[in-house]
Image (tube, helix red, strand yellow):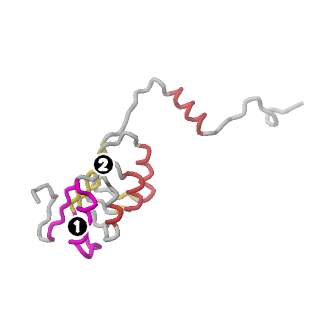
Amino acid sequence: MKCGSTENGSKPVFNSTSMNTQHDIKWKDAPQVYILKVDASDSAIANEGFKYFRDLSKLEVLKMNFCDYLMMKRLEIHISWYLKEIVCNPSVSDGAVYWLAHLKALRRAHFYFLPYVSNRRWFKRHLKLALPRCNVSFPEEIYFGYGYENS
């Protein structure tokens, strides 16, 4: 005599393929909904937070303005093709130029109040050479603003 716990005719399968298939069958009539634009201004995104951008397959625009905590390595890996605008992120340093140069979709970069940037002229020149289609503005400390005025 075999007990139900020792032998079971239906074995549960927990591989990702079958789970995706079950999900597709269950939600086949649901409308396709996509996130197209994200405004992550005034946010603090740590390393773990960037992995959630990986699944946004239809994302077109991402704005990260006034972010207090921004890890450039994670930014470049996960969202480099979506980021369109960066304004005043005080955690940006001289070493961030390398990662910012990889953001080919970036169209507007406005920096001020960057205590970790030692050479402002070099920082701005390097970004303009690496990203020719990006409007890079880096005003003097006495002129603070959002960077939309003609520069």
Say which amino acid is labelled 1: Arg
Q: Residue furthest right?
A: 1
Quarter of the image with the C terminus is: bottom left
Residue bounds of the magenta highlight:
111-140
Q: CA distance from mark 1 to mark 2?
A: 24 Å
Question: Does the magenta-highlighted stretch encompass residue 125?
Answer: yes
The location of residue 139, given as percent across then percent down, is: 15, 66
| Secondary structure of the residue carrying numbered label 1 | helix
Residue 51 pos. (x, y %): 45, 51
Q: Quadrant of residue 98?
A: bottom left
Left-right relation of 105 to 51: left
Quarter of the N terminus within the rendering: top right
Name which residue lies at 20% across and 66% down. Answer: 112
Disc 1: CA contacts within 10 A as few (<14), some (14-19) or many (>=20): few
When the figure is inspected, residue 75 is found, relative to residue 8, above or below; the finding is: below
Q: Residue furthest bottom?
A: 118
Name the outermost residue toward the top: 29
**Residue type, label 2:** Leu
Per the image, label 2 sits on a secondary structure element best described as strand
Crowding at mark 2 (Cα within 10 Å: few <14, some 14-19, many 20+): many
Is 54 above or below relative to 86?
above
Residue 114 x %, y %: 25, 69
Camera-nearest residue between 128 and 143: 128
Residue in the picture at 23% in, 56% down: 132
Above/below status of 109 relative to 27? below
- Which residue is identified by label 1? 125
Based on the picture, tell me whether residue 133 belongs to the magenta stretch.
Answer: yes
| Label annotation for residue 62 | 2
Earlier in the chain: of badge 1 and badge 2, it is 2
Please give left or right for residue 39 compared with residue 2 in the image: left
